[in-house]
Amino acid sequence: MSRVIDKLAEPAEKKKTRVIVASCSRTGTLGLYFAMKILGYKPYHMYEVVLVQGKQGMSALLEAVTAQHNRLSGIKRFGKADLDKLTADYDCLIEIPSFLGPALLDEYVQDPEVKFILTERDPDRWAKSVNGTAGFIITAAASFPLNILKYFDEELRIFLALNTILYAVLADGTKPGQLGNEAALTRNYVEYIKAVKNTVPKERLLVVKLEDGLGWEQICPFLDVPIPEEKYPRGNDVDNFKAMAEGYFKERTRAAMLRLGALLVPALVEKISQARATKDAIYAELVYDNIAPSWMANVGDALERAKGAFCKSYNTFTLILRVVAMASFLHNVDQVWCHQSEIQWLVSGKLNQNESDMLHTTANTTYEFPDGPFVGIHKAPNVAIIVPNAIMPRIVVESGWNESLNRLREDAGEWLVGGNGAVQAAIIVNWTSNRTTRRVRGVVELYTLDRSGMPRLQQREQIFPVPPGIQPGNQAITLTRWMIFGRSARPGASPGDILPLGIDRLRTIAQIDMAKMGYSPA
């Protein structure tokens, strides 16, 4: 899965990290942010991320935090090189270890020139302060109007998502006011402070208790810098924090309101009509972004009016809607392929009648992920093989044309990771046409999850041109009884029994259907 950090330009140079403030939020860190600027440092802090870097900076930090704390997110965890790229313009990092875990400190302890500051306060008072500030944002994010408007402003959505996941990490997923919420906050805070003290050598760590006072007298001698003439900057109390948050919300909600007037349905129907009017088109797919969940009922109405178009997928996190405006004969050969293969399994004795009856094979049926990292996402695979009493399919097949191979691979990853283990295999069929020669090439790929829960390419077979030396019947996508039936397999049957999807059969079906379109195999 592509990452925001990988798309950022490589920095011309990386500032050397000089100081790390390993404190948690609400322990004088905003005051330290301004203090370090006065002392000549360039500090990285949430204030900087939100109000200076904006959407791009928040997106990258959200990605880092999500990858660190949600192993099913499908996002590769940040290494030190990634973090160096994210913070290349800064020589002082504030709160970052509390976001990504104290183990991060090990990387910086190796550099003897890096100094560490840890501010702490009474754990119970800290928990109440967090709920009065970050908790205020979490509550607002789940309440009207932000719970609606966030879908109409990308920066606002990312800001709320970032704060939500950071709070969830601190509070073990509990919400402000819930039973056990403050106990979870206090427990995690105490454990984090202990971990920092156990990781950083005492001679390089300045520990300051807020109750004893925090000012130039504490930090300047430790940093070997003179005390400035300016008064030590004080951070934000609860009232000031709420005022800053409300000011930010006001700006972002104004931008969101401007987008509310977008007329999706008429535009969608018009685009579908235009796509179908293209004489030489063999497949048409429309992609829309910033589509709010509240609009999806209207999208269904639009597709009904368009007759034959269907929603391919809708991602409630990215707010991207994909609509197939015109499918071709060849686009749907995988449906016939799977159906005929299931008949062959029964006729050959690989399945008995009861097992065959258990297989429910659907086409372009929309499924909603019930849990996992992509909960709420809607996807409609070209083919889905599902067994009774299952919410999600066991096997999915996606098909596409030409330049869509990377997108199909992302689809496969979303099915496997988002399915939370329910989807055992994702098959993608990709066709490439040459409109000059009227020839078609094709490949089919099988993806499964590896032992770490990440998508992997398990098998790749060429459809057209037919690979040299391939004997009839010797090329197939290999599925197993366990992949298809899981715990629903009949007693006594081996879960490793092979149930093949023969490539010869796929070639025959594809050749018939591409001929209807005026094409032939490459």
Image (cartoon, grey):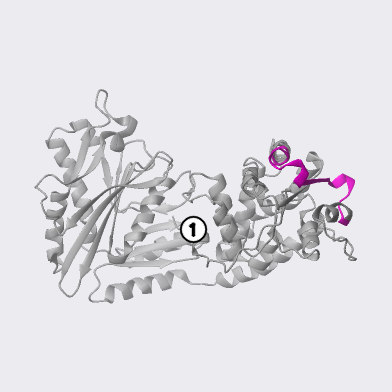
Residue 420 covered by magenta stretch: no
Residue most extreme to the top:
492
Choose top left, top right, bottom left or bottom right for residue 150. Answer: bottom right
Quarter of the figure with the C terminus: bottom left
Quarter of the figure with the N terminus: bottom left
Choose top left, top right, bottom left or bottom right for residue 520. Answer: bottom left
Residue at screen point 68% across, 69% down: 251
Residue 208 covered by magenta stretch: yes
Residue at screen point 79% across, 57% down: 32
Residue 148 in sight: no
User: Total of numbered circles in the picture?
Assistant: 1
Q: Magenta stretch?
A: 194-216
In x, y percent, where is residue 332?
Answer: 23, 57
Residue 437 in sight: yes
Name the residue nearer the viewer: 106 or 275: 106
Residue at screen point 26% across, 27% down: 490
Q: Which residue is mark 1?
A: 3
Q: Is residue 174 left or right of residue 1?
A: right
Vertical position of residue 269 compared to residue 109: above or below: below
Q: Is residue 366 left or right of residue 293?
A: left
Vertical position of residue 344 compared to residue 285: above or below: above
Name the residue nearer the viewer: 214 or 65: 214
Vertical position of residue 117 compared to residue 490: above or below: below
User: What amino acid is found at the position of numbered circle 1 in the picture?
Assistant: Arg
Choose top left, top right, bottom left or bottom right for residue 443. Answer: bottom left
In x, y percent, where is residue 372?
Answer: 48, 44
In x, y percent, where is residue 93?
Answer: 69, 56
Q: Secondary structure at mark 1?
A: loop
Which class describes the residues within 10 Å of circle 1: few (<14), some (14-19), or many (20+)? some
In x, y percent, where is residue 42?
Answer: 71, 64
Residue most extreme to the front:
112
